[in-house]
Image (cartoon, rainbow, N blue to C red):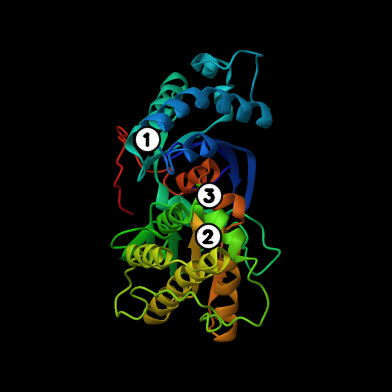
Amino acid sequence: MAAKNITILGIDTSCDDTSVALVKIQDTKYKILSNVISSQVKLHAKYGGVFPSLAKREHQKNLPAVFKEVLEEAGLLTLGGSTSREISREVEPLKIDFIAVTAGPGLEPCLWQGINFAKEIAKKYKKPLIPVNHIEAHILANLIVRSRTPLKIEWSPTPHNLPAVALVVSGGHTQLILIRKIGQYKLIGETRDDAAGECFDKVARILGLGYPGGPIISQLAAKVAGEQFSREGELFSVKLPRPMMYTKDYDFSFSGLKTAVLYRVKQGNYDKIEMCHEVQQSIIDVLIHKTIKAAKDFGVKSIILGGGVAANEELRRQFYLNLKSKILNLNFLVPPKNLCTDNAAMVATAAFFHRAEKVKDIKADANLRI
C-alpha cells in the first residue's frame, strides 16, 4: 500500500506511562505532530515497582487529558471542550487515518485501558484500528529520527539495514530478535528469569536507592570515571559474575546477579558507588557479548537496540566502542533516549507497517509474543 500522507494516532498504556501521539508519514518523510507522555513513576516509587491496579486507575484518569493535549499540539481540536471522555467529539475526524494501540505485551489491566479508549474513538469516527506489538514498536522506534550521528538513522521503510539482530531490553523484557525484514521476526534468545531492567530495580532496592533503579544506578556508576579503571573491574574490591555470558545459546539470566549483590551486601564493607558500577558493567558486558555473538552467527548487517534500558548512556557508548574496536562491519542503530522509553509515537510508527491488515477485534494479551 502506497503511503499518501498518512496520519496515525498512537496510544500506549502497556505499563505505567500513559502516552498518546500523532505522527504523519508520507513516503520517506516522517513527522511527529505530538507525542505526550504522562508518567506515574512518582506514584509507584513507594511500592518499589509498578502497582497494577493503581496504574490502571491512573491510565483511566489520564487518557482523556493526554489525548486532548495531543490534539491541541497537533492543531486538531476544533472546540474548547473539557477533558472528559467525550473529548472525542471535538476531533476533526478526517484528519486521522488510523488509530493504533498497544495490545501487548504488558500489564493486562493497563493494556485494556488503552484498548478500550482506542475502540471508543475508532467507533465514533469509523476509523480503522490497528493492534501493535509493544516489542516491535520498540524496535521500529529506530526508524523515526533523522541521522546526524552514528547512533541514529533516517526514517526509511527500505531494508538497507536488514537483516539485523535487535536487542530489546527493558524492565519487563530482555530479548534478542532476528529481523529478516520488517514484520518478519524470530525470537532467538531471551531472559530465563529477571529482565535486565528488573535486575536494576531489584538491586537498587537491596542498596536502598529507590525506584526506578536503572537511572539511579547509572548516575552513581558514572562517578567511577577515568581510564584508571579496567572494564573487568580489576581494581575494584567488588567483583560480580557475568551470568550466562559464555553459553552457546542467546539466552540471558540476571537473577543470579541480584543474588550475588545480596550476598555481597550482607558481608558488609563495600562501597555503594563501586557496587553500582560493577552491577551496571556486569549487565552491559553480558548484553553486548551476547548480542555481538548473535550478530556474527547470523551474519546480519545491523545491531538494533531498543527498550527503556537502551536509554542507558554507558550501554550505548560501550556498544558503539565495542563495534568500532572490533572492526565489525555492522551498523549500530539506537533511538534517541526519549524514544527508548514507552511512548505512543513508536506505536503509531509500528502501525504504519500493518495498516493493510484487517482486524475484527482487539484484545489485551499480557504475554504477546513477537
- Whether label 3 touches label 2, CB < 8 Å: no
Residue 118 in sight from this viewpoint: yes
- Residue 195's spot in the image, x, y percent? 38, 58
Asked which secondary structure carries label 3, the reply is: loop
Residue 190, above or below 24:
below
Q: Quadrant of residue 256?
A: bottom left
Q: Write the residue at 36% across / 66% down.
A: 263
Q: Write the residue at 63% across / 60% down.
A: 154
Q: Is residue 222 left or right of residue 262?
A: right
Quadrant that contains the C terminus: bottom left
Residue nearest the observer in this picture, 13 or 172? 172
Q: Amino acid at mark 2?
A: Ala
Q: Amino acid at mark 1?
A: Pro
The residue identified by callout 2 is 310
Asked which secondary structure carries label 1, the reply is: helix
Residue 145, above or below 150:
above
Residue 179 in sight from this viewpoint: no
- Residue 199's spot in the image, x, y percent? 41, 58
**Which tag is nearer the camera, tag 1 or tag 3?**
1
Q: Which mark is residue 360?
A: none
The residue identified by callout 3 is 341
Disc on the earlier residue, 2 or 1: 1
- Residue 177's spot in the image, x, y percent? 37, 64
Residue nearest the observer in this picture, 30 or 235? 235
Residue nearest the observer in this picture, 286 or 295? 286
Q: Quadrant of residue 166?
A: bottom left
The residue identified by callout 1 is 52
Asked which secondary structure carries label 2, the reply is: helix
Q: Amino acid at mark 3?
A: Thr
Q: Is residue 366 left or right of residue 303?
A: left
Disc on the earlier residue, 1 or 3: 1
